[in-house]
Amino acid sequence: MSEKDLLNPINSIQLIGLDDYFFELINLHKNKDLPKVILLSGKKGVGKITLVNHLLQYIFDNKYYDLKNKIINKASKVYKQRLNETFPNIIHIKNEFPNKTKIDDVRSLKSVLLNSTFDNLPRFIIFDDVEKMNANCSNALLRLIEEPSENNFFILINNSQGNLLETVSSRCLNTKIFINTATRLKIIDYLIKHKNIDVLIDYKKFDLTPGTFLNYNFIALNNNINNNLDFITKIEKLLNLYKKEKNRQYINFAMFFIEQFFYNLSLEKKDDIYNLNNSKIKTMKTLNDYAEYNLNLSSVLNSINSEFVNVT
C-alpha cells in the first residue's frame, strides 16, 4: 500500500471508537444546532480528521452512509469526489510539511467564501494543525471566523503541538478528543488487520496514537529501521533523514526510540532512575538542538553515544 493510501485518513471508511464525539456532532447537525466554528483538540493521530471525514460524509450523503456501523459506502459519488479532492463544498487547508499555510492562503480564501456554495449546500472549511499557524495567519483566520456567512462552517484541528491564539479558541466550540488505552489498541489492531501492515513499532507498551503509529511504522518499513538494528544506528538513520528532508517527524520518531530505550533500561536499573532520567533529558535536548540550531550530525551522534555508554 502506498504512503498516500496508508496515511491518508480519507481511506478510513470505518470509524472505530470516538462514538460519543461522532453522535454528538451528528445530533447537533440533525437539530440544526451545529456551531459555525468547531475546534477539535487532542493529540495528533488520535482520529480527529477521520472523525470529521465521517461527519461530513454523513452530512452530504447520508444515503450512502451506514450510521449504525459508522461505515462509508465506497459507491458514494461524494466519497469518490472527496478521494480526488474535487468535492466543491469541502475545503481542507492541511498546513503540513513542506506546504505550510501562509497568510496569503488565508486571505485568498476570503474571496472564495463570498461566492455562493454548490447547490446552496453548506460549505465546510477545515484548518489542520491550526496551532502551528504564525501570528499573522492566526489573525487572518480570526477575521474569517468572526462573522461566517450563513452557509460557511469552520472546523479547526488543534493537535496540541503549540499554543493556539486565545482569540481564535474563544470564538469556537472546543471539543477535546481523547481515547483510552483500550480504544487506542482496538483502533491500531483494526488498522493492522485491514491494511495488512507489517509491524515494526511496539505500540502496545508505549502510548502512540493510531495515526502516529501508522506514520512511524511506515517510516521504519520504508527505511529498513528494524528491530535487528542497535539503538544508535536507528537514531543515525532518522537524523540523516531529517538532514535530507528537514521534516520534524524524523526528530519526533528518534525521540520515541530514546523514550523506548530509557524505559526498557529503567526496568533493569530500578535503583538508578534519577541518573537515567537526567541522561534521557540531555539526549532529548541534544536532538532538539540538532533540529533547532542545525548542529553537526557527527557531533550530535557522538554526544548521544556518550550518554548511551554512560548508562549501559
Image (cartoon, grey):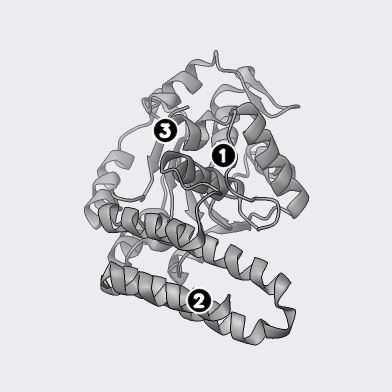
Q: Tag on residue 50?
A: 1
Tell me which residue sits at (69%, 38%) in the image: 189
Q: Nearer the viewer, mark 2 or mark 1?
A: 2
> Which callout, 3 or 2, points at the residue further toward the start of the chain?
3
Residues under labels 3 and 2: Cα distance? 39 Å
Q: Is any atom of residue 146 visible in this view?
A: no
Q: Dot 1: few (<14), some (14–19), or many (≥20) neighbours within 10 Å?
A: many
Q: Along the line of sight, which residue is nearer the eye, 266 or 249?
A: 266
Q: Which residue is mark 2?
A: 309
Q: Position of residue 152 (x, y in %)?
A: 43, 41
Q: Tag on residue 198?
A: none
Amino acid type, residue under disc 2 in the picture: Val
Q: Is any atom of residue 213 visible in this view?
A: yes
What quarter of the picture does the C terminus occupy?
A: bottom right
Q: Position of residue 162 (x, y in %)?
A: 45, 67
Q: Which residue is mark 3?
A: 4
